[in-house]
Amino acid sequence: MLWKRSERNLLGILSVIALILLLFGALPAPGVGEKEFLIKKFSPQGDVNGRIEIKAVFNREVAIENRIGIPLSPEEMPFIFTPSISGTGKWANSSTFVYYPKAGLLDKATSYTATVKAGLRDKEGLQLSGKQSFLFNTAPPIYIGVKQTDFDRERETLSYELEFSLPISPARLRGYTDVKETSGKPVEFQIVQGPASRKIRMNVLTPGSPKNMKLTISAGMPAASGNMGMVKGISVSLDIAQNMEIRDSNAFSSINNGEIYVETTAPVDFSKAGAFIELSPKSNYTIEPRDRGFAVVGSFEPQDRVKLTVRKGFPALGGTPLGDEWQRTFIFPEKLPEIRFTAPGRILSPSGSMRIPIETVNIDTVQILVWKLFENNIPIGMRSPWSEYPIDLSSMLANKDYKVKGGLNRKVRSALDLKPLIGNEKGIFLLLAQNNSGEWTESRQVVNVTDIGATVKTGPDSALFWINSVSTGKPLYGAEVTLWSWSNQPVGKGRTDRKGLLKVRYNTDGDLYPVLATISKGTDTAFIRFDNGLYGGKDVFDTNGDPWVYKGYNAYCYTPRDIFRPGENIPLAAVVRDAGNKFSKPFPVNIKVFNSRGSLSFSHTEALTKEGTISKEFNIPADAPTGTWYMSIHVPGEDEPIGQKEFYVRNLPPPDSLWKQTPYRIY
């Protein structure tokens, strides 16, 4: 009994000694001398949001000293990422590996797997064991909601806007979407096609009277990019409204002005809307169209208090007007931090000033990042008309912070000098200006630093190029021009003559039709797209004119003026010519007039004169809807017009007096 008690005392004493030794470091720490080589910690795992770094902590030393803190080559990376992630990997210390994705971001709606390369060993040659594969993902697409945005009684259609958390391809969405009456009867609908977007339009055909309907979107619907789809499907009711109602409103303060946005259930008849809007206190403003409603825009400043009244009878275009007066008082908020590049152009000559205007408000520091597009990636990077390209196709040249001097809510215009950022480099650059503190905001712009000026005129099977020097205006001899298809295939090539001219023929097949041309001379490279070229404001300054007719007929339609009142007679006229700009013999044509709602208001068929002309007078009904009308000329039996002319119908007040014109005296 005494022996057993002594044994227990001895064990207790030994335990206390061992604990003391451990506390003072006399015994090995955990991990030292461990027989297994393991990953102790890996991050991220599961859902990922925002900017990240990928980190793996091992329980034993792996990296040798001369490889710590320097970028690793792909062969030296301890992990393989599937799908691949562009970025840089380093050993932070001998047992911690960190991978930095480009710009700290992963692709949206993407599930990733990080797998340790086979045969990874520690410094003592022990092979890795335990878990060696880790999963993480960015958020999948989520359905947010649906709103009715428009209706058309004549066409018996309702328009809706579907909103998602990520851009969705309309073409893909169509395959996952269904609309049915609550009884289960299918309803005909159309997803409006266009580029991928978070907000997508859907038109629903409702013959007769609209019935209660349900919208269904199946699980698995993918985002425009990434390998993940919607986790859960949805089934929701579609609201139906055919009268003018105000759904929502809000006041915004932007870099230039303030505006009150009003969301409506029906399209607004802007020709009459002004008489139903009132502001208190009174101030100058404009009423401007906005998506799903309108905006009252003026020089409103933060903290201004404004009462907006929309009076009963506020007009809907084709629907019942507002039934009750609507009022709301707004206090304009502080301006949100905002950055924007203000110049629409893209060409900068390296021999001139390389300053780019940039405007900011409520921002103290602007971070400027510059990427240069690899030359062999220009055809695929610049084929789309967007103001940027994927940064994976480029290399980063600069990352610099600039201080901005400005007061609260005061717009500051600065000049960004590219010369210190890119040096003597030429090519195509993506500029990103962003605010890293507080409210996130950014602006992007693509700039082509080049002395090559390109003009192109395209035909059905060829393109004519004029290539000049931007700095001197002289023709560039021997510049190489390459035409590229959407699928990144070269479809034509040539060199300019001494006049800077080149004609390149190409295949008219849809898959090989050129969408872009690159021009190079020595180390200088430029590009021009065939949809809108390099002039950022081409939608305002369009010099293309009507397309040339190579077969069939073309009609030039005209009216004596462009604006008419309801009740007036309009003389409609047209001149018809064939592909050779000639006219051989008369034949019948059909004149059609469509009102501002898109409905046919007039149709008349008559033979052309021997000169190839036709004229007809059309009376605008006194109760005709105002807005943009158009006439078109058709060859009987053909839906496609051979000519069109827009004109406007407005309720204009008659002149108060007639002015007598005094003839000029001729000496």
Image (spheres, grey):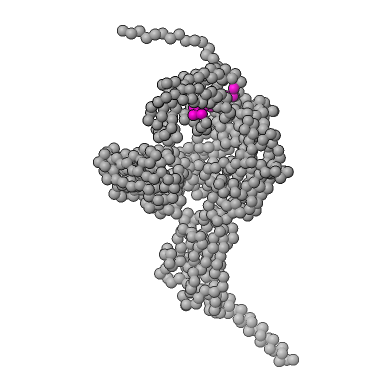
Q: Quadrant of residue 69?
A: bottom left
Any part of residue 191 in sight = yes
Any part of residue 372 in sight = no
Q: Residue furthest left?
A: 498
In the rendered image, residue 632 lying in the magenta stretch gets the answer yes
Horizontal side of residue 589 vs 582, given as left or right = right
Which residues are the magenta region?
624-636
> Which residue shows up at 65% across the image and 29% down it?
319
Q: In this view of the protein, which residue sits in the foreground, 667 or 127?
A: 667
In the rendered image, residue 86 lying in the magenta stretch gets the answer no
Q: In this view of the protein, which residue sits in the foreground, 578 or 641?
A: 578
Q: Residue furthest right?
A: 1
Estimate the x, y position of residue 192 in percent, counting from the top left.
57, 41
Quadrant assignment for the C terminus:
top left
> Which residue shows up at 40% across the image and 31% down it?
579
Number of numbered discs on residues: 0
Q: In this view of the protein, which residue sits in the foreground, 650 or 624?
A: 624
Query: Quick check: 236 above or below 328?
Result: below
Estimate the x, y position of residue 265 in percent, counting from the top left.
64, 34
Horizontal side of residue 194 vs 1, given as left or right = left
